[in-house]
Image (cartoon, helix red, strand yellow):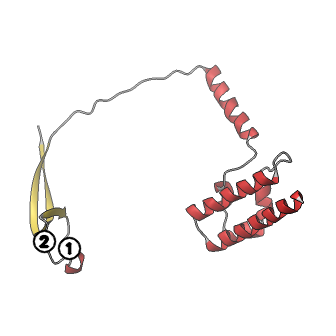
């Protein structure tokens, strides 16, 4: 057994290119081209009934596999010396600027990381800020810090 559903609105007829579209509210003259004419309409649509199959399944994962997966995840996090940029950049701009060294220490820069790797990570931090938030004061500050790290790298190479 199907149901009938009624839609009320306007069919917008573009008599120049024979285009049709439907919308619920009447468009103002500024919202339509000079070739469009709004026609009030009520559409009755037959909505068929259909059965949506339900599926259920119980998965049993042995405890050994769960422990192994968790330990691999923990090992991976401990081995990764860099923290994602979001964990630094969620701070307000004034906090980032005032406490950048402390925030950077959260990145766990080990002695094993080269200055080149630090610069690379800092570039990803800057890139993330550009694409996600693009706060001018933070971008400017991060660019200055990146230049400092690059200058440091040049001095170390000499």
What quarter of the picture does the C terminus occupy? Answer: bottom right
Q: Residue at x 19, y 80 (%)?
A: 29
* SS state under label 2: strand
Q: Residue at x 66, y 69 (%)?
A: 139
Residue 106 in picture, x, y percent from top left: 77, 53
Q: Residue at x 82, y 65 (%)?
A: 151
Residue 31 in picture, x, y percent from top left: 24, 76
Find out whether the residues at labels 2 and 1 contact each other: C-beta distance under 8 Å: yes
Circle count: 2
Left or right, residue 16 beside residue 151: left
What quarter of the picture does the N terminus occupy? Answer: top left
- Hey, which quadrant is residue 119 in on the image? bottom right
Q: Is residue 70 above or below residue 106?
A: above
Residue 6 is tagged as: none
Closer to the N terminus: mark 2 or mark 1? Answer: 1
Spatial separation of the CA atoms under disc 2 and disc 1: 7 Å
Q: Is residue 61 above or below residue 3?
A: above
Viewer-nearest residue: 118 or 93: 118
Residue 42 in picture, x, y percent from top left: 9, 61
User: What residue sits right under mark 1 in the picture?
Assistant: 27
Residue 13 in picture, x, y percent from top left: 12, 67
User: What residue sits right under mark 2 in the picture?
Assistant: 38
């Amino acid at each position: 057994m199907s149901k009938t559903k009624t839609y009320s609105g306007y069919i917008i007829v573009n008599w120049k290119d024979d285009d049709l579209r439907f919308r619920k509210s009447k468009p103002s003259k500024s919202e339509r081209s000079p070739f469009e004419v709004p026609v009030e309409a009520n559409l009755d649509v037959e909505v068929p009934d259909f059965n949506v199959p339900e599926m259920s399944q119980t998965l049993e994962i042995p405890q050994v596999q769960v422990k192994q997966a968790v330990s691999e995840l923990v090992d991976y996090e401990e081995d990764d010396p860099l923290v994602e940029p979001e964990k630094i950049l969620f701070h307000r701009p004034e906090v980032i600027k005032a406490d950048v060294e402390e925030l950077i220490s959260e990145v766990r820069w080990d002695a094993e990381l080269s200055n080149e790797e630090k610069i690379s990570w800092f570039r990803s931090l800057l890139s993330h800020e550009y694409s996600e938030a693009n706060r001018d004061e933070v971008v400017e500050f991060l660019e200055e810090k990146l230049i400092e790290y690059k200058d440091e790298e040049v001095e170390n190479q000499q």
